[in-house]
Image: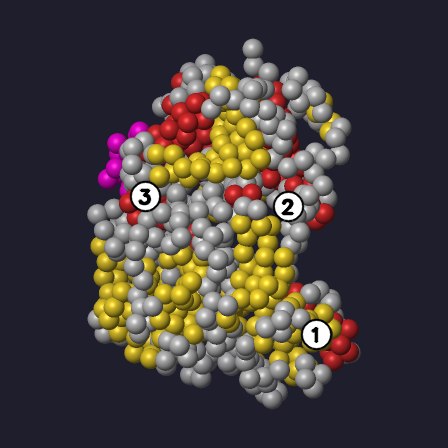
Amino acid sequence: MAFALISMAQNSPNIPVKVTDEKLFTEEQVFWSGRDYHNYAVENRLYAWWGDELVRLDRNECFVVNKKTGNEKSFFTRDQIKSWLAPDSTFAKVSLRAVEFPYTDRPLALLKSGEGMALVDFKQGKLVWKMLEKGYVASAWSDKSLNFAFVKDGNLSVRINGSIEGEKPRTVQITNDGDDDNIVYGQAVHRNEWGIESGMFWSPDGKKLAFYRMDQSMVQNYPLPSFLNGNRVQDKKTRYPMAGDVSHKVTIGIYDTDSQQTVYLKAGDPSDRFFTNIQWSPDGKSIYLFEVNRLQNHTQLDVYCAKTGELQKTIYKEDSNKYVEPMTPIVFLPWDESKFVLQTRKDGWNHLYLYDIDGKLVKQITSGEYEVTEFVGFCKSSHSIIYTSRQAGPIYKNLYSVNVDNGKVTALDNGYGIHGGGYNKILSASGKYLFDVWTSHDVPRNIDVVASNGKSVRLFSASNPWAEKHQPIFETGVIKASDGKTDLCYRIVKPYNFDSTKKYPAVVYVYGGPHARNVDDSWHYASRAWETIMSQRGYVCFILDNRGSAERGLEFEQATWHQLGKVEMEDQMKGVEFLKSLPYIDGDRLGVHGWSFGGFMTCSLMTTYPDVFKVGVAGGPVIDWSWYEIMYGERYMGTPQNNPEGYKNSSLLNKAGNLKGRLLVITGGSDPTVVPQNCFNFINAAEQCGKQVDFYVYPDEGHNMAGHKQVTLHKRITQYFEDFLKFRE
């Protein structure tokens, strides 16, 4: 046996694999929930800006960082914070790794806990303001007014917190019909699509609150049984609007803390549209938001009066013969509030455009066959925008600055790797500096402080935490898609003691769906921990980003429209063709594994190409897109009514009888994302055709396993391939 360092028990999933070489990894060491993971994770450091002053955050101490040298000196400690807060112990255990500095001109540190918030003056060493509230499920705080909005017991309240000088706070409950089931206030709506991450939005002066109200009483309850609480099964039901069915109704309210009145935007019938990317005008008098129609082929940017709720004007429209997808709110220029930056893919690639408040296009700011991936912020003094993009290539993400006036682009990093990650606020208050957390395939993590001219100083360089272990061989490359012209990026992971004269079983790991990608020039080319475990067991792992995956432009993504699974599988099979051409791959021992969309792809590949894949493990798979939710499903598939052929062809119920190999399907018993009926119906369809499907349910778990179950889950997946792929006759 080629890999005698590992002893394994065939067909015995309950017998653990014994690792006899200490230089080999265990699951406890490489998975984030593993008991020994902390010893093998890449070291990180946290930073925050106080104006243009860079501060490093640690659990017990904060340090001021010299931006020219990287040298540090103590700023304040947690013991000092405790003494300043005494005798109040509410925030005594708060780690300083989460401290914020909301004011550029005041020496105030913001502390947060599950019980409230506090502002501490770190120059005078005293508590200047605090807010205590428990049991809320969503919140929003204004650093201008200190007002705090929160959802508790289903309803929305606003705590009017006066001023830092000490005005007595008061709490106003502004809704009374919320119940977190039928009527939901102040939380993300439309199942978090179109970049929706929150449900409350303070005006620039912090005196008006825009909030979502979602009426989902017309959406059918979906039962999610809980078996682990008490003597009887409980129902953790959720409202689940399936493709083609009735959707929930969302409206947007505005509460004025001065008048204590609430108005709702007069946006017409909310049952045929979605509302996203809410933005206040700089003067707080208007609300800007994108409206998307139910077909998702039209969007418009509308302006509403914050005082009356009346529609003032529509200033931008965009149509598509497939779908539109506004993902970010507009952003007003800080030096000219009559103009704003809008992101759109109307030319085929996500770029930045400058418009005036009447909707007139002033100019296109960025252009080219690459995606702008994130708007980072402004440098007001130079009239520049800092952003990240894929300009250097599809596996790279880099930082750039573009001058809005003349269009000059300045690169702010080394031109390779993945930059600007891990933080929401990497830019200083003036925009003249940023800290860049970056990685590359051979760089675990570096952190630089970068000036607006691109000059940088290294703050931190992480060592390789795997240096004393056997490390897999990580490689990347490009093959052509099934169209013969489009480049697809792949990652291949080989055993640490790879021998090109031997034959290895191979496993294809696949996701393949929108809004995700698997191959990047990050640490180990973004390889997952499971690939390391599999490679040291004697497998080669292959990962390909097919058409339909993220940040490669509209044509690349929309190639899968109305036919999910078809183009993706064609591209994956080009990857398999390449894989089988490698002399060290045993083409008769190919497996496939994926989760969620990747679970759908796994089942699709196993039933469409049953003679190619011998073993598969599908986690949380979509089996029929008519059972998926409206917002995501209808964007890519339309409705079962207007795309019946697409739904029929993508459904795996009709393909279950093709199954030949061994297939393990795994689901969370209370999965609210890909509801369990997908798995049950697939198993039933296979049974009716005389086919056997192995099935495992994690009771009461959701779409992904929580905590240490991530470790046991991957042990189960690994063992399945060990039992049925590695030693096939």
What label does residue 556 carry, if any? 3
The image shows residue 415, relative to residue 483, as above or below, that is below
Residue at x 26%, y 62% (from the top left corner): 300
- How far apart marks 2 and 1 lie (CA) works out to 32 Å
Looking at the picture, tell me which residue is in the foreground, 174 or 436.
436
Residue at x 72%, y 35% (from the top left corner): 23
Q: Earlier in the sequence, mark 2 or mark 1?
A: 2
Amino acid at dot 1: Lys
Q: Position of residue 295 (x, y in %)?
A: 26, 49
Amino acid at dot 3: Phe
**Residue tagged by mark 2?**
32
Residue at x 60%, y 27% (from the top left corner): 498
Amino acid at dot 2: Trp
Looking at the picture, tell me which residue is in the foreground, 328 or 531.
531
Which secondary structure lies at badge 3?
helix
Left/right of residue 17 with respect to residue 361 in the rendered view: right
Q: Earlier in the sequence, mark 2 or mark 3?
A: 2
Q: Position of residue 301 (x, y in %)?
A: 28, 65
Q: Position of residue 134 (x, y in %)?
A: 63, 67
- How far apart marks 2 and 3 lie (CA) works out to 32 Å
Do the numbered discs 3 and 1 sit on residues whose CB atoms are within 8 Å? no
Crowding near the residue tagged with mark 3, few <14, some 14–19, many ≥20 C-alpha atoms within 10 Å: some
Q: Position of residue 685 (x, y in %)?
A: 42, 22
What label does residue 73 carry, if any? 1
